[in-house]
Image (tube, rainbow, N blue to C red):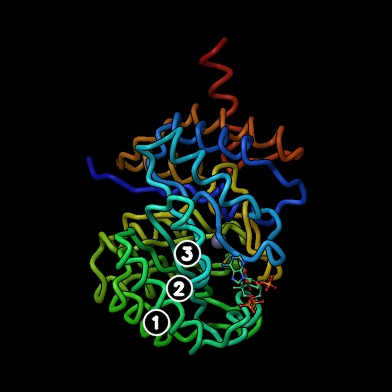
């Protein structure tokens, strides 16, 4: 059976935007539940300015807790610059992700740099991470549409993805940051990217703002993409991209993949336990499109 590789980004993308701020021990419990559900890879936190994202201010405390409790879990952390990399390395990071948006305005809003500077800083950060022996990912954000500049030119996405690849990024993550992509766009863009980037180095990061994330994931699968970011319970969204809803829910993606003959290694019951935990902690109902049906199946099995 063909395998689909999922990185659960709930601890970072999911929590960075929540009105309720979780403490490090609660975030550790979230990571433990994900690992128990069979998730093999997470994005744990970000080493960004605590003024920009207070929800991630405990990164240096959290990462060593996760590394110690879950040494076999692949754990990536987001770093926007060399200072972030330095802090992540000091906290024991083994994998880092840089974030380059494909438009001038989005870079300015997100990391206070123009596109050229953001590209150079991402390249320098990747080079330094490589020197330190860390695994790397590079996000190309707003790769479909930008909330400030409209549709992002595909050529620009290809150019930046190449730059990140040449800079040594182990994985290039194409992000639909505001969840505006359609299956047709995904097929076209991921198809073009797959011609230039090996499929084991190419990932897609979808948001579900318009209810099309699972359809978009299927379009990516059809052009050969096998690496996906997702967030348990569908929590998430970028605080600097207005109107963005949560990520594609991990449980929706797993259900779709397993029903279509792909193996994920992830248990839906385990994901439901994680959603239950997260919604108590975040004090609001969570879950992807299939959550009601999934809960009903679990009740039937348990009765
Ligand atoms: N982690 C923590 N602090 C950082 C930092 C990092 N990675 N990079 C810079 N800083 C600190 C500087 O030391 C300085 O601190 P001081 O005011 O105490 O002297 C302050 O932040 C300003 O530094 P500067 O280099 O001028 O940064 P900036 O104000 O232009 O902000 C970023 C740039 C990248 C740090 C900031 O925009 C940021 O953290 N963005 C996060 C974006 C994000 O997480 N988006 C969601 C995920 S895509
Ligand atoms: Zn995102």
Q: Which mark is residue 160?
A: 1
Label 2 sits on residue? 140
Q: Give the residue at x 41% y 65%.
A: 173
Residue 168: percent from left, percent from top: 29, 72
Q: Residues within 10 Å of mark 1 (few under 14, many from 20)?
A: many
Q: Earlier in the sequence, mark 3 or mark 2?
A: 3
Q: Name the residue under label 3.
A: 86
Q: Circles 3 and 1: CB distance less than 8 Å? A: no
Q: Is mark 3 on a helix, strand or loop?
A: helix
Viewport quadrant of the C terminus: top right
Real-space CA distance between mark 3 and mark 1, rounded to the nearest whole angstrom: 24 Å
What whole-number distance in Å separates the C-alpha atoms at marks 3 and 2? 22 Å
Q: Is residue 248 above or below residue 276?
A: below
Q: In which quarter of the image is the N terminus?
A: top left
Disc 2 secondary structure class: strand
Q: Residue at x 35, y 76 (%)?
A: 164
Q: Position of residue 53 (x, y in %)?
A: 68, 61
């Amino acid at each position: 059976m063909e395998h689909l590789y999922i990185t659960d980004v709930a601890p970072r993308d999911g929590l960075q935007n929540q009105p309720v701020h979780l403490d490090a021990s609660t975030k550790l419990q979230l990571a433990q539940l994900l690992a128990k559900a069979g998730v093999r890879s997470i994005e744990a936190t970000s080493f960004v300015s605590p003024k920009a994202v207070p929800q991630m201010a405990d990164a240096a405390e959290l990462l060593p807790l996760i590394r110690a409790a879950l040494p076999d879990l692949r754990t990536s952390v987001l770093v926007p610059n060399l200072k972030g990399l330095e802090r992540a390395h000091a906290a024991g990071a083994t994998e880092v992700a840089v974030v380059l948006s494909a438009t001038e305005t989005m870079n300015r809003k997100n990391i206070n740099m123009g596109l050229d500077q953001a590209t150079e800083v991402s390249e320098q950060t990747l080079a330094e991470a490589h020197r330190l022996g860390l695994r790397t990912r590079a996000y190309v954000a707003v790769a479909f549409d930008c909330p400030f500049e409209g549709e992002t030119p595909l050529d620009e996405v290809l150019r930046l993805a190449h730059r990140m690849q040449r800079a040594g990024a182990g994985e290039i993550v194409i992000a639909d940051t505001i969840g505006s992509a359609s299956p047709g766009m995904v097929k076209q863009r991921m198809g073009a990217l797959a011609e230039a980037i090996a499929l084991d180095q190419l990932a897609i990061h979808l948001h579900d703002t318009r209810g099309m994330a699972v359809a978009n994931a299927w379009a990516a699968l059809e052009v050969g993409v096998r690496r996906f970011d997702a967030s348990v319970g569908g929590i998430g969204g970028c605080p600097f991209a207005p109107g963005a809803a949560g990520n594609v829910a991990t449980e929706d993606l797993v259900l779709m993949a397993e029903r279509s003959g792909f193996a994920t290694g992830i248990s839906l019951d385990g994901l439901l336990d994680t959603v239950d935990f997260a919604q108590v902690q975040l004090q609001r109902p969570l879950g992807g499109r299939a959550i009601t049906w999934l809960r009903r199946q679990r009740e039937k099995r348990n009765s």
